[in-house]
Amino acid sequence: MNKQSNVYTVIYIIVLVVVVGTALAFTSMSLKDKQNANIMADQMRQILASVHIAPESDDVIAQFDKYITRQFTVNTKGEETSTDALDVNMAEQVKLPADERSLPVYVCTLGDGSTKYILPVYGAGLWGPIWGYVALDADGSTIYGAYFAHQGETPGLGAEIEKPAFCDQFIGKKMYKNDHFQPVTVVKKGQVPQGDEDYVDGVSGGTITSKGVAAMLDDCLTPYANFLNNIR
Amino acid sequence: MADKVNNKSVFFNPFSKNNPVIVQILGICSVLAVTAKLEPAIVMGLSVIAVLAFSNVIISLLRNTIPNSIRIIVQLVVVAGLVIIVSELLKAYAYAVSVQLSVFIGLIITNCILMGRLEAFAMANKPWPSFLDGIGNGIGYAIILVIVGFFRELLGSGTLFGFQIVPQAAYEAGYVNNGLMILPPMALIVVACIIWIHRSINKDLQED
């Protein structure tokens, strides 16, 4: 048989691709459940990180069930729409106009009995998506904690948004100023925002990522205005 | 290379005299990227060993059937398939590490060591020597990753495997972690230091 002929080459590559494709499909199918469980547990870990709880990796689900006492989604009018916040795909939601979104809310009851509202945010950094969770006190205004993460921001520059040095600046900032709802913004160090909203310093050298965080907070938290008004 | 390959030298040569990283200077990209901490460096090393060994064996088994005109494509398909399997396994069983390694597992496909070994060795040798060659080169790569990861994590973060090594008292006395160690350029400098030491021991490797 002539191994250099076109027919042989074409058949060879078709067989090879079918075999490799089958092997990959099989691997993917058989590991899917375990991977989804990992992704879910990772999401829970991030949500808990916004209220300063860092469980061991095998303890995440138990801790999540312990502290997150209620989860639901609301619409922009502040009405509850469903009871499954974890299944909401933030990447898809932020593409919708604000009044069509499902807005997830996680209600967290801490050891001391205080209630926190955790709101997810999702936006774009310099190289890829950035996301996070903002935990508010029961007054619906004071930030109790914030957690940010990114997919591929520059290490040492934009990637600093995930560090406590950046996230912890948000603690104590207010979403309501003079009875007026305004999400906290991020400005270049040494500057102040044009409005009277609370602000934190951006990451030096990570200007675009910092602006992305500010835009993300504005875009994702503004739709919660009515909901937060109701709980105040 | 002689017709009859010496299995022992096939296995051990890549550790030092023919190390893929510090002698052939291949796979430098991932050495820079994944060695800021020791744990991802070890996982990356193990992943490369696994992919290299199995792709070498598979290509060696197929070597007499592969049409010459598409041999690189065949090699790529095999490597890409194995890399995706490794990546899926990590996502299922070592999620945190797979997040840390992110794209670099996928980029094993483009690691020059793999294509180099497949073209230079597996295409011309039987499966068993090819398997040893894959393991040997994988270990040669992993050794360098671990050495670089060790120094970068120890000097850059003061930890090893995430455990604090540098005592708190040292920080109180004014010791500061070297933040530069975390950044990619220091990986290059550490690799250069390893090459320097290695060449000064093995004088026959020194160029004029």
Image (cartoon, coloured by chain):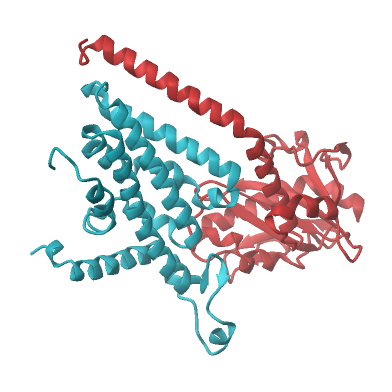
**Quarter of the figure with the C terminus of chain B:** bottom left
State which quadrant residue B79 falls in. top left
In this orientation, does residue B176 appear? Answer: yes
State which quadrant residue A53 falls in. bottom right
State which quadrant residue A15 falls in. top left
In the displayed orientation, state which residue is furthest to the bottom. B173
Is residue B27 positioned above or below A166 on the image? Answer: above
* Chain letter for the cyan colouring in the rendering: B
How far across and down, in percent of the image, does residue B110 sit?
35, 41
Q: Could you tell me which residue is drawn at 38 percent across and 37 percent down?
A: B54
Q: Nearer the viewer, residue B187 or A182?
A: B187
Q: In the image, is B96 to the left or to the right of A12? A: right
How far across and down, in percent of the image, does residue A71 sit?
84, 45
Is residue A131 positioned above or below B3 on the image? Answer: below
How far across and down, in percent of the image, does residue A150 sit?
58, 52
**Quarter of the figure with the N terminus of chain B:** top left
In this orientation, does residue A183 appear? Answer: no
Q: In the image, is B173 to the left or to the right of B24? A: right
Q: Could you tell me which residue is drawn at 25 percent across and 59 percent down?
A: B16
Q: Could you tell me which residue is drawn at 54 percent across and 40 percent down?
A: B89
Q: Nearer the viewer, residue B196 or B46?
A: B46
Q: Number of callouts in the render?
A: 0
Q: In the image, is A174 to the left or to the right of A169? A: right
How far across and down, in percent of the image, does residue B171 sit?
55, 84
What tint does the image give chain A? red
Is residue B194 positioned above or below B80 on the image? Answer: below
Q: Nearer the viewer, residue B100 or B88?
A: B88
Q: Could you tell me which residue is drawn at 45 percent across and 66 percent down?
A: B182
